[in-house]
Amino acid sequence: KAGVTQTPRYLIKTRGQQVTLSCSPISGHRSVSWYQQTPGQGLQFLFEYFSETQRNKGNFPGRFSGRQFSNSRSEMNVSTLELGDSALYLCASRRQGNTGELFFGEGSRLTVL
Amino acid sequence: ELKVEQNPLFLSMQEGKNYTIYCNYSTTSDRLYWYRQDPGKSLESLFVLLSNGAVKQEGRLMASLDTKARLSTLHITAAVHDLSATYFCLDQFYFGTGTSLTVIP
């Protein structure tokens, strides 16, 4: 059974640009959550999508957005990149009605120059 | 404000010793999760604790949950080098600060 797949794994952008990250959840999982991990702030919750709807949201500015498609695949977008957006972005999926356990992808490492 | 606090943040222990990592959370959640992260890697699920009094054990690690005290513990027994990693607890969507564990031979 394939795990959570994130693309791209690594990317470099410059300030002011925008970036789109993709996440394919485990087959049958309908919930996708996104996290930002930095050495200074740790693991911070961005948002959760379920059945194409944003169900929960963390405390991030509007430059961070996401969406989910009918096949449960999700994308997150960061516009007007800042140096502080450099981080590992992790996607996780969970199967509703189950234990609520999150299964994580390998992450997308974003460097903003 | 939702908070999940772990302590200690850093833990250096000798092989063969025992130690406990604490996770305090602020919600009324009845479930809590523990994850492990190796350097440069993603998060690996260790334990899923689904109710008050839940106790799970896997090898040298044992996790427990006290929902009344809003406290979960991760106990390490007779530590070995392979346990060196960062450990996180998760309450709903919010992770703890993490505990970086180094086991010294």
Image (cartoon, coloured by chain):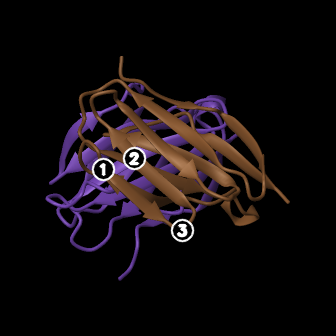
Chain colours: A purple, B brown
- Tell me which amino acid carries mark 3: Gly
**Quadrant position of the C terminus of chain A in the picture:** top right
Does label 3 lie on the same chain as label 1? yes
Give the secondary structure at mark 3. Answer: loop
Q: Is residue B36 left or right of residue B104?
A: left
Which residue is at 23% across, 39% downward? B30
Residue A113 appears anywhere in the view = no
Is the Cβ of the residue at disc 1 closer than 8 Å to that at disc 2? yes
Residue B20 horizontal/vertical position (percent): 58, 42
Q: Is residue A11 left or right of residue A31?
A: right
Circles 3 and 2: CB atoms closer than 8 Å: no
Cα separation, mark 3 vs mark 2, equals 14 Å
Disc 1 element: loop
Q: Residue at x 63, y 49 (%)?
A: B86
Three-letter residue code for mark 2 = Ser
Tell me the residue at 35%/83% (across/down).
A1
- State the residue lying farthest toward the bottom: A1
Instruction: Identify the residue at horizontal 46%, vertical 60% (top origin).
Output: B46
Q: Which quadrant holds residue B84? A: bottom right
Q: Position of residue A43 (x, y in %)?
A: 52, 39
The circle on residue B23 is none
Task: For mark 2, give the secondary structure.
Answer: strand
User: Residue A103 placed where, x, y %?
Assistant: 39, 61
Badge 1: chain ID? B
Q: Kindly report the distance in space between the C-alpha atoms of the residues bearing marks 1 and 2.
A: 6 Å
Q: Which mark is residue B54?
A: 1
Can you say whether A27 is above or below A112 in the image?
A: below
Residue tagged 3:
B59
Residue identifier under label 2: B64
